[in-house]
Amino acid sequence: MASSRLEILNDGGLRHDARRPYELRSLSLELSTHPNADGSSTVSQGLTTVSASVFGPREPKQRAGSVHDKASVVVEVGVAPWAGAREVRRTRGDKRLLEIAAAIRQTFEPVIMTHLYPRSEIAVHIQVISADGGILPTAINATTLALVDAGISLIDYVTSLSLGLHLTQPLLDLSAPEEADLPTLVVAALPSGKVTLAQMETRLHVDRFEEMLTLGVEGCGVLKTEMDRVVKDRTTRVVERMDKVIQGRITGD
Amino acid sequence: MDIDQQGDLGEGSSTNRGIVSPGEIITSSKEYMRGHGTYVDEEQVVSSLSGTIERVNKLVSVKALKQRYTPEVGDLVIGRIVEVGSMRWRVDANARQDAVLMLSSVNLPGGVQRRKIESDALKMREFLAEGDLLVAEVQAFFGDGAMSLHTRSLKYGKLRNGQLLSVSPRLIRRLKSHFHHIPPPCGPSGVDIILGLNGLIWVSVGTSVESREGGEGFDAEGVYSNKNDDITPEGRQAISSIASIIKILAMYNIPLSDILISSAYEWLSSQREDDEDGISAEMGKRMVEDLTGVQVTAAA
């Protein structure tokens, strides 16, 4: 295995991409990146870039998908051919992609106030543009922003982060080589500290789990602050412009 | 964000207008009632959207920056037929659910107050088929929140001779009239604009006032026609210019009105050469700045 030669933490306590254990990758958040969607966003965490588009609430595409008293959430995940995702095959209906889609749906169903939109459908389309570990957490972050952009009522922001454990040292926000070598935990949480998703594919000592979960929730809080800043900036900018135009017209400028 | 410290909402300048994001506490639920876009959690009114706080007396609501159209009775909407059913059409009007247009709430050719009989139900697809565009008014709501439309006015009905545009519903405000006519020299017979409150806009070749309101020259048989009239190249150009103007204004999040659109057209005709068509990005930006007096840096 090529990746086993990777030194997870070097003597200086740095990771293979020169981050410290608790350091997140560089984060970039963009809103309204898709012109035709009701809401969209593109989120980059390090070299992982995911774009999410939200359509709806709209009439369900399949009549069977309509629930009489709430909205149904439909998630579809696709991976671009050039994304470089070795761990997932790109075909639609691939088990790994379906699993990611199901995890996203389960994360957001309790957070979206679906009872406000009866008999309708909220469709979330995820496109992985480049993959370098942490597809699921990045996709969850992108979905949150896209839902906010679409003006769909949410209880709160949901943010997500992946964590790994090297010996006894937890590492935050794993890149692909680290993800391949370490037991990984994906946490999605509300700012209140409520965990909406905790997913693991490998075994982990129960004594370490609590520490990692707490750390993950804390990291999610950091991401939320950053998201809120971007959303507020955009809202303020647009509202100011619309106010100016309306006021200018009233005074007859 | 504490609502009490903000002074008078809505009237104040943009800087002190409350801007909230999901999960943000607005105020205590003991003193205020929660409206749209908010929920109550542990005696606090909390926002569930990103947008501005709107307050009416004790009712606090949050209006999102961008949202699907929420219908209200009396709204003028533009929609597309998606299904022909028994005694009804289903219409996609850009809302949360498809709207319903009953056979009993349309005007059929040959008499306004005529009863609808079985043979009309069989001919429904001749009147409006899948894919047809129409302008209608919201009549009522069903129990599940779906809206019912009506076209019982000569102003409403099937659309032709024009182009459909889609903008954010927030940019279209409720006005006295949503039918506008820009007179010549904008095209040989002017250009008609219908601003649907659901964010859909119809720009079509201009008609005279009488023929629009069912007076002299009103073509009763042409109401359900599927054929476009002949439109001159100048008329087409006028339609596409108006459409480009609307697209540019919408791109910069400028609320639309007939005055703004017609002054934009005047500005454009004074600025560009006769043989020039299309609007460059630079020119669009200059147009927005000149007309609104707002410095635009980038489309938000």
Image (spheres, rainbow, N blue to C red):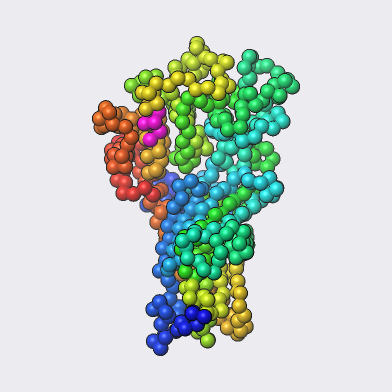
Q: Main secondary structure of the magenta part?
A: helix
Residue farthest toward the bottom in the current orientation of the protein: A11
The quadrant in which the C terminus of chain A is found is top left
Question: Is A251 part of what is drawn in magenta?
Answer: no
Left or right? Give the position of A99 relative to A225.
right
Taking the spot 52% from the left edge, 80% from the top edge, the residue there is: A1
Left or right? Give the position of B171 relative to A185.
left
Residue B263 percent location from the top left of the image: 33, 30
Q: Looking at the image, which is closer to me, B121 or A128?
A: A128
Taking the spot 47% from the left edge, 83% from the top edge, the residue there is: A5
Residue A238 percent location from the top left of the image: 40, 49
Residue A121 percent location from the top left of the image: 62, 49
The relative height of residue A45 versus residue B167 in the rendered view (above or below) is: below
Question: Is B243 part of what is drawn in magenta?
Answer: yes
The relative height of residue B107 versus residue A22 in the rendered view (above or below) is: above
> Is residue B182 something one can see in this rendering?
no
Residue farthest toward the front in the current orientation of the protein: A1
| Number of numbered discs overlaid on the protein picture | 0
> Is residue A70 something one can see in this rendering?
yes
The relative height of residue A41 versus residue A136 in the rendered view (above or below) is: above
Magenta-tinted stretch: B239-244
Residue farthest toward the top in the current orientation of the protein: B216
Taking the spot 52% from the left edge, 68% from the top edge, the residue there is: A86
Q: Quadrant of residue B92?
A: top right
Taking the spot 60% from the left edge, 65% from the top edge, the residue there is: A96
Residue A237 percent location from the top left of the image: 38, 51
